[in-house]
Amino acid sequence: MSSSKDARGACITGIGCYVPEKVLTNEDLEKMVDTSDEWIVTRTGIRERRIAAETEAASDLAYHAAREAMKKAGIKAKDLDQIIVATATSDMIFPSTACVLQDRLGAKNAAAYDLTAACSGFIYGLSMAHSMILTGKAEKILVIGAEVLSSMTDYTDRTTCVLFGDGAGAVVVEPCEAGKGILATYMRSDGSYTDLLYKPGGGSRMPLTAERIRQGKQYIHMKGDGLFKYAVKAMVSAARKTASDAGLTTEDVDYLIPHQANIRIIEGVRKRLKLTKDQVIVNIDRIGNTSSASIPIAWCEFERDHPERVSEGDIFMLVAFGGGLTWGAVLYKK
Ligand SMILES: CC(C)(COP(=O)(O)OP(=O)(O)OC[C@H]1O[C@@H](n2cnc3c(N)ncnc32)[C@H](O)[C@@H]1OP(=O)(O)O)[C@@H](O)C(=O)NCCC(=O)NCCS
């Protein structure tokens, strides 16, 4: 890379993804809670989701996605100088999942750290990598969204267990010529809505005890309708702001890759941004909501399954929303 550090861009040079083998279908869920395939499909768009094996933690899913991304980028683990893992379901509270992954990859020269921004985690991680590359603080960064949401899902609670799945997506970010790759990033949060989506137990506020486990404090708690209202508005405004920061409008966007939380949320965003269905990358029917992993998995599958639909110069808008609340977007030029 010969361009000077003050006039360079940040490009994704490799993308990878991994989902566990086990499939949990709506029919399976019908046997577990009082629900129906019809309710789940019409209210969420989800038909099935993947569930990690008992032996698989977030770093294991991340490992497979990372290896694929690094292979496509043509780089070795020792070349990495940063590993950022966005996750809400880390292997342990500490050390970070990124450190566990660093060891498994053999990325001896990297600084490794986790980032917690729930479903917006990949967007936050990509924004961080963008800044690190532009300021010359790093040359090769692995950004990963990896989640084992099944580890904190209550499979007796029909309002949440139908939504979530497990998986990981990874990208390698490297310097490239200015004007290509990441064109703009945007991150926002509103901590006053923490109670819309959270896991109360297991942190320093509420260490887990037998009594708290009996009360289900180790599980995801969610107020779905409150989130729904906020999600569409926040994602639309993030997309518009990010496009305008890059000197563009959302009319310039070729493809939208939204966080896969609910097909009705995705449709709401699509209509407000006046995009066609073909322009929106959707895999929620097969993968469910995998939080920080959802955008890189959807992107990775799209590039793998439809290479003929992607051309140099295409503009991708990645947009996410999640617990925190957090939201944000990244505008990317191929
Ligand atoms: C969760 C969500 C799918 C619920 O859809 P909804 O249309 O808002 O449904 P409601 O919450 O109004 O519930 C309607 C009814 O269905 C019931 N219901 C909830 N889950 C059900 C299920 N899995 N099967 C059958 N019925 C269910 C409710 O109990 C309620 O019954 P009631 O009217 O008798 O009380 C929707 O609110 C959503 O997707 N919200 C956003 C969630 C999200 O994105 N979370 C992650 C953020 S990243």
Image (cartoon, rainbow, N blue to C red):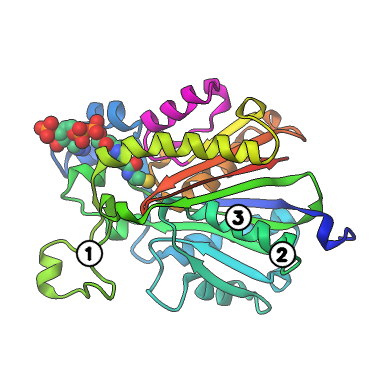
Residue 3 position in % (x across, y down): 88, 58
Up-down relation of residue 224 to residue 124 (above or below): above
* Label 3 CA crowd tier, 10 Å (few <14, some 14–19, many 20+): many
Residue 251 position in % (x across, y down): 63, 25
Select label 2 or label 3 by which is in front: 3
Within 8 Å of ligand 1, the CB of disc 3? no
Q: Is residue 142 magenta?
A: no
Residue 280 position in % (x across, y down): 54, 29
Disc on the earlier residue, 2 or 3: 3
Disc on the earlier residue, 2 or 1: 2
* Label 1 CA crowd tier, 10 Å (few <14, some 14–19, many 20+): many
Q: Residue at x 72, y 68 (%)?
A: 138
- Find ligand 1 in the image and state its quadrant: top left
Instruction: Identify which residue, 292 or 104, lies in the foreground.
Output: 292
Residue 24 seen: no
Amino acid type, residue under disc 2 in the picture: Lys
CA gap, disc 2 to disc 3? Answer: 14 Å
Checking the image for residue 127, the label placed there is 3
Report the side of 323 relative to 247 (left or right): left
Q: Quadrant of the N terminus?
A: bottom right
Q: Residue at x 77, y 44 (%)?
A: 180
Circle 2 sits on which residue?
140
Mark 1 secondary-structure assignment = loop
Checking the image for residue 218, the label placed there is 1
Q: Residue at x 48, y 66 (%)?
A: 59
Disc on the earlier residue, 1 or 3: 3
Q: Residue at x 19, y 43 (%)?
A: 158
Magenta stretch in the rendered image: 259-285
Mark 2 secondary-structure assignment = loop
Amino acid type, residue under disc 3 in the picture: Ser
Q: Quadrant of the C terminus?
A: top right
